[in-house]
Image (spheres, helix red, strand yellow):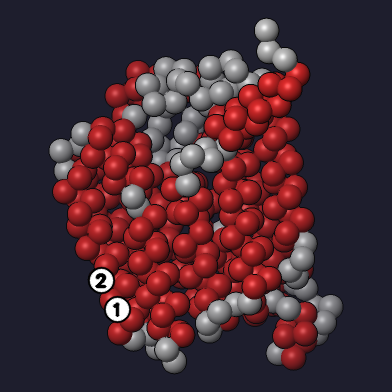
Amino acid sequence: MTTPSAAVPNRLALYLQLIRWDRPAGWLLLLWPTLSALWLAAGGFPGSHLLVVFSLGTVLMRSAGCCINDVADREFDRHVQRTAQRPVTAGRLAAREALAVGAVLALLAFALVLTTNPATIALSVPALAVAIAYPYAKRFIAMPQAVLGVAFSLGIPMAFAAVLGEPGRIAAAGGGAAAWGGAALAQAVPPLAWGLMAGNLFWVLAYDTEYAMVDREDDLKIGIRTSAITLGRLDVPAVMGFYGVYLGGWGLLGFAQGLGKPFALGLAAAAAQALWHWALIRNRSREGCFKAFRLNHWVGFALFVGIAADLALR
């Protein structure tokens, strides 16, 4: 019989398992493009406040997304080898309790956003909506990874809004302190932000297709849709094409902003990793595909270091 004193640590362990605390790759995949956007928007270090808001907010929102995903997919996950022992799927945590944990985490993330400005707060609403919608996309959309791409990329325009969307800055640019319509949002989120977001979406397509390749056999049996199933034998060349669009797009945008050799080195390091991932996934083994997915955050890290170093040396 479990004593009350032992119940709390056991519950905490379940919550940590629920939010994948032991698997930081998920929130790192969100973190690096968001920090890259922060640095580009600020022209260098964005300040400790925004660094804390977006770093901690990324961890909180990814954790909340895990809670929503596990509840939505609990009937599917029991048929997938890799996910059958997740707390909700295995019956060790009630769906209602998992959703409550996710709600608390999302509210904490929103509290952080409230310390920024109206433009960032406005963008957080669609970001939350897409995060909630994603787990259900695989029931209706042939490539639900595209929806995840939007969810995992909205931190980029939010980062630009947090830096450029201060009311004083908007007013100085002629928007007026109270002019919080489309024109003011356009000033807070320039075309560069949307271009980076579009490029990042292709990176998400690349690594989440690798992830889907791990579960393809199980997913075919239970009848859900993924990019790995939709692409079929074109999965490997498609993944490499996605990498190419992502790296090419970010490269062009970075060089257009005047970034130089440090950025080029970061871009080259990211491209080298993408080529290594091709070697890991070309035979479509579960182990190779999962390793490629799990290590993908180093691709984003390489680009972030290149951007931060370049701006620091100006």
Amino acid type indicated by mark 1: Ala
Occupied quadrant, residue 291: top left
The quadrant the C terminus occupies is bottom left
Return the residue at label 1: 264
- Which numbered dot is residue 268? 2
User: Which residue does the image show at 49% across and 30% down from the upper left?
Assistant: 139
- In this view, the residue in front, 252 or 13, is 13
Q: From what the image shows, is residue 82 above or below residue 242? A: above
Q: Which residue in the rendered view is the most extreme toward the top?
A: 1
Is the residue under label 1 in contact with that under label 2 (CB below 8 Å)?
yes
SS for dot 2: helix
Q: Local crowd at mark 2 within 10 Å, few (<14), some, or many (≥20)?
A: some
Residue 285 seen anywhere in this rendered image of the structure:
yes
Residue 280, how many percent across, how many down?
A: 20, 45
Occupied quadrant, residue 189: bottom right
Residue 142, how many percent across, how many down?
A: 40, 37
- In this view, the residue in front, 47 or 80, is 47
Q: From what the image shows, is residue 74 above or below residue 112? A: above
User: Which residue does the image show at 15% across and 38% down from the upper left?
Assistant: 283
SS for dot 1: helix
The quadrant the N terminus occupies is top right
- In this view, the residue in front, 291 or 285, is 291
